[in-house]
Image (cartoon, rainbow, N blue to C red):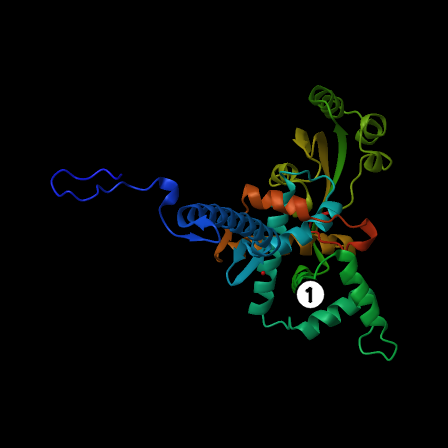
Amino acid sequence: MPRRDRTTGKPKHRPKPESERGQTVAGVSWREGYTRWAILGGVGALLLVVVGLIGYRWYDENIGKPREVVLRVEDQSFSLGYFTDRLGPFAVQNPNLTEGFREPAMLTRLEEEAIMVHMARERGYDLSDEAVLDHIAEDLGLERGGDDNTFDEVYRSRVRQTGMGESDYRRMSRASLAESLLLEDVMDDVGETGETVTLRAVLHVDEDEATAIYERIDDGEDMGEVALEASLDPESREDEGLLEPSPRRLYPGEIREALEDADEGDLIEPLEAQGAWWVIRVEDIDPDGEFTEEVQQELADEELRELIEDTSDELEISRSLSDSQRRWAYRNWDVPDTAQVPPQEAPGQAGGS
C-alpha cells in the first residue's frame, strides 16, 4: 500500500529512477543520444580542422609560397617561384658559389636585370614580346615565321629544358635583350683607342719571396730573366713577364691605385692583388693605344656595371628573402644539365611575379 503524506493523506510522490525519466527514440533516451551526437560532432569538427590544415599546407606550399615577393625594383616585382626557377641554372653557371652565398648573388643578379630593363625603357628601347622573341631567335641562330616552324619547335624545347614557364623564360630573355642593347650603347662610347699601360710583372704567393725578387731587380738584375725563373703566372712568364697593354681601369684595384702616379720605367714595390704578390714595372704608357675587341668588351662591361650602380642609387629597391623562403627554394629548385642552360652572367662577371 502506498505511503501517504501525513498532512494531506494523499499518496506521497516517489521520484522515478534515472533510467525511467525522459523520452526515448528508437530505444535510446534523449540524454544518451545527445552524448553520442556530441561525440560524433566533435570528431567531425576535428576532421574538418585536420583537412583544413592539410589543405592550407598544400595551398601555401604550391600556390601561396611561390607567389610571395622576394625582390622589388620600382614597379618590377620578383616572386619566390621565379627566383627558384632561376636558382638552379644560376648554380650551374656559378659553381664556385655555395649555399649561403648563392642566394644573395642570385638576388643581386635579378636586381641588376631589373635595373637594366628600367634603363632600357627609360632610353626608349623596344622590349615588347615581339622584340623579345626576335632576340631569342637571334640567340638561337634561327629566323621567326618560317614555313617549317623550326623556331617554334626549338623555342618550345628550350623553354622545357630550363624548367621555367614561358612567361618567366620571356622575362629572363627580356633582361638579356635590355643588357645587349645597353652594351651596344656603351660600346659606342668606349671607342677603339685610348690610354693603355703595358706592365712587366713577376708574381709570387709568398711576400718575402716577392720582396727578394724586387730587390734583385732593383739591384739591376734583368726583370725578364727573373720572370722566366721565378714568376708563378704561366702565361706572362713565357713572355718574360710582359703583360698585354691594357687601360688602367681594367687592372685590379690595388694595381690601379699604384699606377696613378707612376711613370714609364718605374719599378713598384711588391703589392698584393688577386691572391698573389706582384712585382711590377711600367714598361710603356701610350695615350693613343689601340683597344682589342676583348679590351673593348671588358671596358663596356665595366662601364655598364658603373651605370647600374649609379642607377640603383636612384631607384626604390627592397629585398625580403626569409629563411623559410630560402628553404622552400631549395626544396623546389631544379638543377638542369649544363648544356641546357643559357649564360646568365652579370655584366663583366665570368661564369656568372
Q: How many marks?
A: 1
**Which image quadrant for residue 166?**
bottom right
Nearer to the camera, 239 or 104: 104
Check disc 1: other Cα within 10 Å, few if <14, some if 14-19, many if 20+: some
Q: Report if residue 267 is visible in the image.
A: yes
Judging depth in this view, the residue of 132 and 170 nearest the camera is 170
Q: Outermost residue, bottom direction?
A: 147
Image: 118 above or below 45: below
Q: Residue furthest front?
A: 1
- Which quarter of the rendering shows the C terminus? bottom right
Looking at the figure, which quarter contains the N terminus? top left
Residue 88, image x, y percentages? 71, 48
Dot 1: what SS?
Answer: helix
**Which residue is most to the left?**
7
Above or below, 257 relative to 225: below
> Residue at 36% of width from left, 49% of height from top?
22
Report the amino acid beneath label 1. Answer: Arg
Question: Do we see residue 246 in this rendering?
Answer: no
Q: Nearer the viewer, residue 149 or 221?
A: 149
The image quarter in which residue 151 lies: bottom right
Q: Left of 68 or right of it: where is 161?
A: right
The picture places residue 250, in percent across and down from the top left corner, at 68, 46
- From the viewer's perspective, is residue 33 above or below residue 205? below
Q: Where residue 246 sits in the image (x, y, percent)?
A: 72, 47
Identify the residue shown where x is 84% and y is 34%: 234
Q: Disc 1 marks which residue? A: 170
Position of residue 174 relative to residue 40, above or below, is below
The residue sitting at 48% across, 53% down in the picture is: 26
Q: Position of residue 162 (x, y in %)?
A: 75, 56
